Image (cartoon, rainbow, N blue to C red):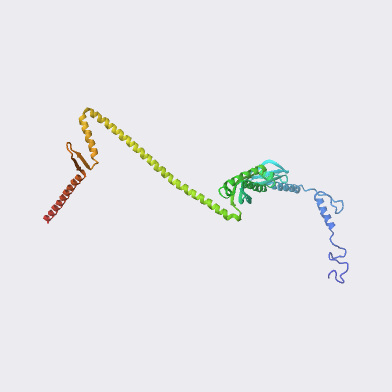
Amino acid sequence: MAWNEPGGGKDRDPWGNGGDQGPPDLDEAFRKLQNSLSQMFGGKSSIGGSGGSAKPINFNIVGLGILLLVLIYLGLGVYQVDEQEKGVVLRFGKLTPEIIMPGLHWNPPLIDRVLIENVTRVRSRPHDSEMLTEDENIVKVKMTVQYVISDIRKYKLQVKSPDQSLYQSTESALRHVVGSTEMHQVLTEGRAQLASDVRERIQTYMERYGTGIQVTQVNIEETAPPDAVRAAFDDVIKAREDEVRLRNEADAYANQVIPEARGEAQRYLEQAEGYKQSRIAEATGEADRFNKLYVEYELAPEVTRERIYLDTIESVMRSSTKVMIDVEGGNNLLYLPLDKIMQQNQAPSESTSSERTSSLDKSSSNSRRDRR
């Protein structure tokens, strides 16, 4: 029967079977918990009067608890620094002189604060902006700044936001360098020098601010004129490229022709030197021959004179095909066509040889007939 049904009795309630029971008393429950804690730590219990005796403290449990807390504290202070990382320690908020190197380390928690950063990874930061050149033209420059952390202390503590400082320094350096350079230099052959100047200026700013950043390289990815005049500048760049191409072709042709001309000149010099040496040797030989003939001439003048005359006539007449002879005591000239005479002498000899050949053929044929 439900407690609120008729006839169930007005003293029945949902918390008990009897009419004297009520809801659980929260004050009583808290009191029991307080007595339990007091007994655990040596206090007196309020239940059952003041005549209860205190229980002794369990030192084993207390010691294990303290040991567990110490182990947890020691474990929280152990950390590892990777090979590419370094760290700095703040002890009660003050920087310590030591630098944490790679390896396993321990620092007391809640006392020391360790700041770890990768110092070997090359970081990259893109940058894109439009600016005026020296000749008051607008160019768009897109580049990338690559950097590493050179000083972990300065990077973590000297500047509040070193990356933001790098961005602002890059903007300032780029505007300064581009503002002192003409537009065609920025768009064409001056890009390499532009990157070098920007890198040096950014590094100067980083050292001045004490950011601990080392700029390794600046890459100019794109330099372009405004969109409104891009077509005209493309034509200018194409013309400059054609100029460079034609210049390279001319240099290649010059590099081909000049060595050939130098070779020809060297050949002519060597031929002239050879002719010089041959003429010197010939003249020396003639002089020696004359000296020897002079000695012979002193011994037999007539014979030597006649011999020299005959040799001279022979050398002169050897290259002549016609000879004119003057007869002493007369007005007639004797003409000797040596070339005709030599041809006539050669013709009979050839006919004689052909007749001999034919006679040999006939005799051989007759001998063959006789054998048959």
Q: Residue at x 22, y 37 (%)?
A: 313
Residue 143: x percent and y percent? 61, 50
Q: Residue furthest bottom?
A: 6
Tell me, yes or no, if residue 340 can be seen here: yes
Q: Residue furthest front?
A: 331
Residue 254: x percent and y percent? 45, 46
**Count of marks overlaid on the render:** 0
**Relative depth, front residue between 176 and 338:** 338
Tell me, yes or no, if residue 83 can be seen here: no
Residue 58: x percent and y percent? 77, 48
Q: Residue at x 22, y 42 (%)?
A: 322
Residue 252: x percent and y percent? 46, 47
- On the rendered image, what quadrant is the C terminus found in? bottom left
Q: Is residue 177 left or right of residue 276?
A: right
Q: Residue furthest left?
A: 370
**Relative depth, front residue between 277 and 325:** 325
User: Is 279 drawn above or below residue 220 in the view shown?
Assistant: above
**Image quadrant assignment for residue 154:** top right
Q: Residue furthest top?
A: 298
Q: Residue at x 32, y 36 (%)?
A: 279
